[in-house]
Amino acid sequence: MITTFQDPGNIIAWLEKELAKVEKEGGAVIMMSHMGNIDQCERQFGLRWHALMDRYQTVIRWGFAGHEHYDFF
């Protein structure tokens, strides 16, 4: 069964609002995020996320996204 993630917790809407505000002010951001696994990133949420990253590539100066299911000590 494939689940479509519209915008859980309004994450995409919030991020787009914040990035637009920074762009308008002529600022820049450093993105640190947790991304879902490859299956989730191919779904609607992932497509919308990557569209935001492309749209605001001049605002996002550096980014780090991770996803891990192992504990390391």
Image (tube, rainbow, N blue to C red):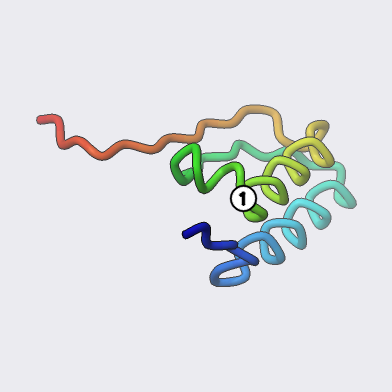
Image quarter for residue 44? bottom right
| Spot occupied by residue 12 in the image (x, y as percentages of width and height) | 67, 60
Disc 1 target residue: 43
State the residue lying farthest toward the front. Answer: 1
Please indicate whether residue 22 sits to the left or right of residue 68 in the image.
Answer: right
| Spot occupied by residue 52 in the image (x, y as percentages of width and height) | 76, 46
| Spot occupied by residue 48 in the image (x, y as percentages of width and height) | 72, 51
Please indicate whether residue 59 sits to the left or right of residue 2 in the image.
Answer: right
Q: Which residue is drawn at 52% across and 48% down?
A: 40
**Number of marks drawn:** 1
Please indicate whether residue 14 sits to the left or right of residue 55 in the image.
Answer: left
Q: Which element is circle 1 on?
A: loop
Q: Which residue is drawn at 43% across and 35% down?
A: 66
Residue 51 versus residue 42: which sits nearer the camera?
42
| Spot occupied by residue 72 in the image (x, y as percentages of width and height) | 14, 30
Location of the C terminus (image quadrant): top left
Q: Residue 14, relative to residue 68: is it above or below?
A: below
Q: Residue at x 68, y 57 (%)?
A: 15
State the residue lying farthest toward the right. Answer: 24
Q: Identity of the amino acid at label 1?
A: Arg
Residue 27 versus residue 47: which sits nearer the camera?
47
